[in-house]
Image: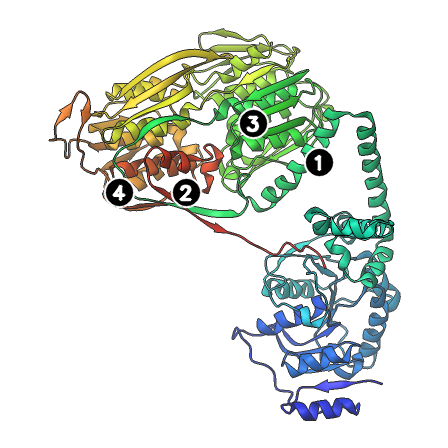
Amino acid sequence: MMQNITQDSDSQVLDRQIATHKPIKGNTKAYTNHQSATPLFKQVCVIGLGLIGASLAQAIKDNGLSTRLVAVDRHIPSIEAAIAQGLLNAGSSVLHDVVSGSDLIVIAVPVQAVQAVFTDIKDAMDNGQLAADCIITDVCSTKVNIIGAAQRVFGVLPVGLVPAHPIAGAENSGYDARRAALFVNHSVIICELATTNMAAVAKIRQLWTGVGATVMAMAADHHDSILAHTSHLPHLLAFNLVEQLASHNDNLDMFRYAAGGFRDFSRIAASDPKMWHDIFFANQSAIVSALDEYSDYLQTMRQLIIDKNSTALMGLLGRAQAARRHFGHMLTSTPYTDISAMSASYTITPSQTVSGTIAIPGDKSISHRSIMLGSLATGVTHVTGFLEGEDALATLQAFRDMGVTIEGPENGKLTIHGVGMQGLKPSKTPIYMGNSGTSMRLLAGILAAQSFDSVLTGDASLNKRPMERVAAPLREMGAVIQSTGHKGTSPLSITGRDKVGKPLHGIDYDMPVASAQIKSCLLLAGLWADGTTTVTQPEISRDHTERMLSAFGYPVTVEGNRISVTGGGTLTGGDIAVPADISSAAFFMVAAAISQGSELTLTQVGINPTRTGVIDILKLMQADITLSNKTYIGEEPVADITIRSSNLVGIKIPESLVPLAIDEFPVLFIAASCAQGRTVLTGAKELRVKESDRIAVMAEGLQALGVDCTVTDDGLIIEGQGSHGQTSKVVGNTVDNREPVFGGGHIVSHHDHRIAMSFAVASLRASKQITIEGVETVNTSFPGFAELANQIGMAIEVHSISNDSDNNDDK
């Protein structure tokens, strides 16, 4: 018996008329448009008031997307409740009772029932209740069979048919489980058909974006394959695992003692069996293919366990663990080390002194190179002191993506099972470098020589930074590499040598600027090139690549500013100890120098002569710095660095020192602001193409805190204010009392980690509280910076804004 229900103000009349199965005539006035905007549709008809259909109906109403809303469902109590609660204007168990005049139909029934729904829709079109161009969409988990069902019913696909699938869901089902916010920040896949009116596609896009979803287009067969692997297969496995355990004689104990992992995985087996029965049959081909592939992987793992192949099993487990984290970061461009902190800020209360003995995290530049060369070596490489910051983790993930087994990191320790010079495998996805320019530029040199195609990409910030500086000389070596846009940024697309048909060839390259990244990129590419690759640099730059190549047994020739490698050699794995990073140490060196009565010792910091520009510059500014316990860790010199409060003076910074301190200039600008007299920096255009334009951003922040400074084309002029307040007693080179140099205020770091840490150091000579926005990127180079700063006497409070979203990814 059909039931046609319309909204009425008297619920008792409603109940009575439903009970007698009579059509109800009541209030058909449209509900209020909550957004006071023109509705997209005159009348939306939702067929099926389960979780997805009812949630979409609620979202349509709450967002004012339709003038009227009607529904069809065999479960009459759901229709009754929806009308009584004011969600629907009318409802019925039969389509033709309510569908007349609808300009959008949403099919939200099990996939096996869709063909029958199409038959009812065609009848409504034939009898004039629906226009021939009425928009028809669905929310089903499969698409090829939906399109096939429409083809069988209509003969020619309707021009208004727009197959769609919201990737959203919840544990509970049914009308009462509906949530208008179910689709917010979730993806909706639309399958655009050649037969569909594009105006219909546009309106369905507007509908889904109107309820808070993100819309993407995908071919129907590709959709079904992707969903078979990411949704349908996991559900099938969950059902199967629960059935397997339930069939055991001791099943009660199995379920009683099952840990959280089992409950998390098997949760989805509580879903509607009929729905999944229909989905498994509807997407049969793709699911069987996914099952076959999964079976192959299970057999591989089974054999690794039987053979006790520890290295291969660790590689598989490690890659899986890292991939699970990595894709989350790549898709959302979030940091590796704290996926919940989407944004963060510092609030810093001024303090006057710092003291103690601390250990600085490992050197980022050396950590990058240990992964790269260890992966390309034969044998095993053990790394200690590895920097577990986001940039270095991006490099580590890249080589895992290319098939390298890497154990760790755990407390700075890594074990890399090298694959040799010809052992890298193509990544199945673009290689995501996060915010690491070093990773991208050095890896471009390695990948330009590989047999396979590659794509390098990064987060929004990295994808704005120039990459032609490495792409152009690589092309001179015969690389086929394409950057993006007229500015030559990433993503970088690199064509494999198998397609090019010949290897790279060595070149003599005169670098226009001193850059360790460009030099290292070309030297790494030269390892595979025919002949010799020689790089001539205008000034000395970091030589970590040369030193580490030698440590791995690869011959490198250094003649002044000319560095050469000859292709065709091999790398041999060994032990790599990463010293503390002098770039990170620089923040604490300046902190101790500018503050009152301070004495701070930094242990076992790398003092590679191509990196000590910061020490040389601070000494020229008359900083009290001493080095002790000098020794070597592998190929790298290290020492303990002690810094005491100092009366700094302004200087003209020698341009020869600029490339030796390029990363340290943000915090050196803080030192210059606290010095007596003018400090002038020239020859530093490189600072404009870092994570931010560090000259402009630092000048902006300094001026906001009351410092007089002038930006030039290639540097900065800072009027130091160190003479203020220095009438107090001076003992040795230490001022007993110091007046503030900086005022308080609000600093925008532009998500540049070195900017954020530099202004944190400025708080030691500030008169008021300083807040710094965008500090979440500090973890790219210095995880634990705030905690370490507070340990020596600073007062940094970290505020994070979390992004807690519903992770249910399919109905």
State the CA–CA distance, disc 4 to disc 3.
Answer: 40 Å
Residue 471, label in figure: 3
Residue 705, label in figure: 4
| Residue at screen point 43% across, 20% down | 514
Task: Tell me the quarter of the picture where residue 455 sits.
Answer: top right
Image coordinates for residue 24, horizontal then vertical, percent: 73, 91
State the CA–CA distance, disc 2 to disc 3.
Answer: 26 Å
Q: Identify residue type, mark 4.
A: Leu
Image coordinates for residue 664, horizontal then vertical, percent: 37, 27
State the CA–CA distance, disc 1 to disc 3.
Answer: 22 Å
| Residue at screen point 59% across, 12% down | 552
Nearer-N-terminus badge (4/3): 3
State the CA–CA distance, disc 4 to disc 2.
Answer: 16 Å
Nearer-N-terminus badge (4/2): 4
Residue 266, label in figure: none
State the CA–CA distance, disc 4 to disc 1.
Answer: 48 Å
Residue 428, label in figure: 1
User: Which callout, 4 or 3, points to the residue nearer the camera?
Assistant: 4
State the CA–CA distance, disc 2 to disc 1.
Answer: 32 Å
Please say if 583 is above or below 431: above
Q: Is mark 2 on a helix, strand or loop?
A: loop
Q: What element carries label 3?
A: helix
Density class for disc 1 (Cα within 10 Å; few <14, some 14-19, many ≥20) is few
Image coordinates for residue 426, horizontal then vertical, percent: 71, 30
Nearer-N-terminus badge (2/1): 1
| Residue at screen point 58% across, 29% down | 410
Q: Identify residue type, mark 3.
A: Ala
Q: Quadrant of the C terminus?
A: bottom right
